[in-house]
Image: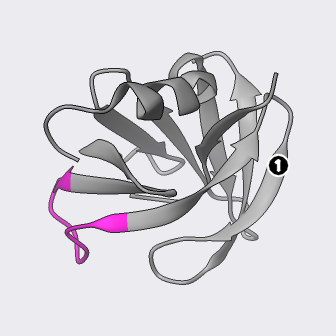
Amino acid sequence: MRLKTLAFAMIACCAIAESARADMNAAFSNTVVSHYPDGAWVKHWFNRDGSYQAQFSDGRRLTARWAREGERVCLNEIRPRMILSRFCTAMVEAAVGDSWSARDPLGRRVRNEMVAGR
């Protein structure tokens, strides 16, 4: 069954609606990987409690809070602080093995992929 998850490259609050949790089930048990043309990558992990973590290919890590806002997923409370304090992107249909094109917060093209496991 194809479940909704998000398509974004890199890095909300409070209670998350049950419908948002259901739409994010594929992301909760798997990893979204954003691939850049230069070979760099970012791994994204979304948790049922609204927390989010990312790991960059250069070793940097990031945390945030995620929330569904309509047909978008938004990150807030991004740590460490970055140029952007908030980032939202459209949700897309995805299942393990699917990939899709997107843009990161700086407008750069990435290829996102849903990979099995954490």
Image coords of residue 107 (percent x, y): 55, 84
Image coords of residue 42 (percent x, y): 55, 49
Residue 42 placement, left or right of 59? right
Question: Measuring 18% from the left and 31% from the top, which residue is drawn there?
Answer: 15
Which residues lie in the magenta part? 77-87
What secondary structure is the stretch in magenta mostly built from? loop
Q: Is residue 61 above or below residue 78?
A: above
In the figure, residue 40 lies in which quadrant? bottom right
| Closer to us: 82 or 76 | 76
In the figure, residue 25 lies in which quadrant? top right
Q: Neighbour class for label 1 at 10 Å: few (<14), some, many (≥20)?
A: some
Residue 67 placement, left or right of 15? right
Image coords of residue 61 (percent x, y): 33, 43
Residue 41 belongs to magenta span: no
| Closer to us: 22 or 118 | 22
Question: Measuring 54% from the left and 71% from the top, which residue is drawn there?
Answer: 104
What amino acid type is highlighted by mark number 1? Ser
Residue 97 visible? The answer is: yes
Image coords of residue 73 (percent x, y): 43, 53
Q: Quadrant of the N terminus?
A: top right
Read off the residue under disc 1.
Answer: 99
Residue 79 placement, left or right of 68? left
**Callout 1: helix, strand or loop?**
strand
Q: Quadrant of the C terminus?
A: top right
Question: Measuring 22% from the left and 55% from the top, which residue is drawn there?
Answer: 76
